[in-house]
Image (spheres, grey):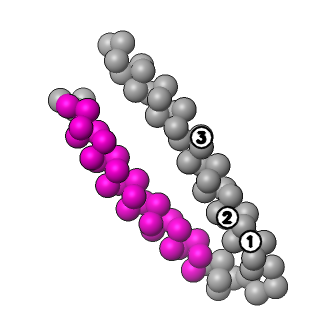
Amino acid sequence: MLPRIEYLYLTMGLFCGFGVGLMDFSSVFIIGVDFDKNRATAMGISFSGSGLGYLLMTPLMHGGMSKGEST
C-alpha cells in the first residue's frame, strides 16, 4: 500500500503515460509495415480498441480503489 494517494497519482500517471506512448508508437509502426491495402481501416480499429481499453480501465480502477478503502 502507498502511504499517500498522491504517490498513486504520480506513479499511475508516469507508468500509464509511458505505456500508452509505447503502445501507440508500436501499433502505428506495425500497422504501417504490415498493411498496404486497408491501412486506414486497420489503424481505425487499432485506435478504437485502445480507446475502448481506456474506457474500461476507469471503472476497473474505481472498483479496485473502493475495495482498498474498506480494508
Indicate the position of residue 24 as horizontal and vertical percent values. Answer: 53, 68
Q: Secondary structure at mark 3?
A: helix
Q: Are marks 2 and 1 in contact (CB under 8 Å)?
A: yes
Residue 6 placement: quadrant: top left
Dot 1 amino acid type: Ala
Q: Alpha-carbon neighbours of circle 2 within 10 Å: few (<14), some, or many (≥20)?
A: some
Residue 15 lies in the magenta stretch: yes
Q: Which residue is mark 2?
A: 46
Pointer 3 or 2: first along the chain: 2
In the rendered image, residue 59, in percent from the top left (x then y), is placed at: 54, 32
Residue at which label 3 appears: 56
- Label 3 vs label 1: CA separation? 21 Å
Which portion, as a residue range, is magenta? 4-29
- Name the side, left or right, on which 21 lies relative to 37: left
Name which of mark 3 and mark 1 comes first in the sequence.
Answer: 1
**Res. 58 mark:** none
At x 49%, y 25%, the residue is 63
Q: How many marks?
A: 3
Q: Quadrant of the C terminus?
A: top left
Amino acid, disc 3 = Leu
Q: Secondary structure at mark 1?
A: helix
> What is the chief secondary structure element of the magenta stretch?
helix
Q: Is residue 6 above or below residue 44?
A: above
The residue that appears at 36% across and 21% down in the rendered structure is: 68
Residue 60 screen position, x and y as percent: 52, 33
| Amino acid type, residue under disc 2 in the picture | Ser
Which secondary structure lies at badge 2?
helix
How far across and how far down the image is residue 61, in percent?
46, 34
In the image, is 20 to the left or to the right of 30? Answer: left
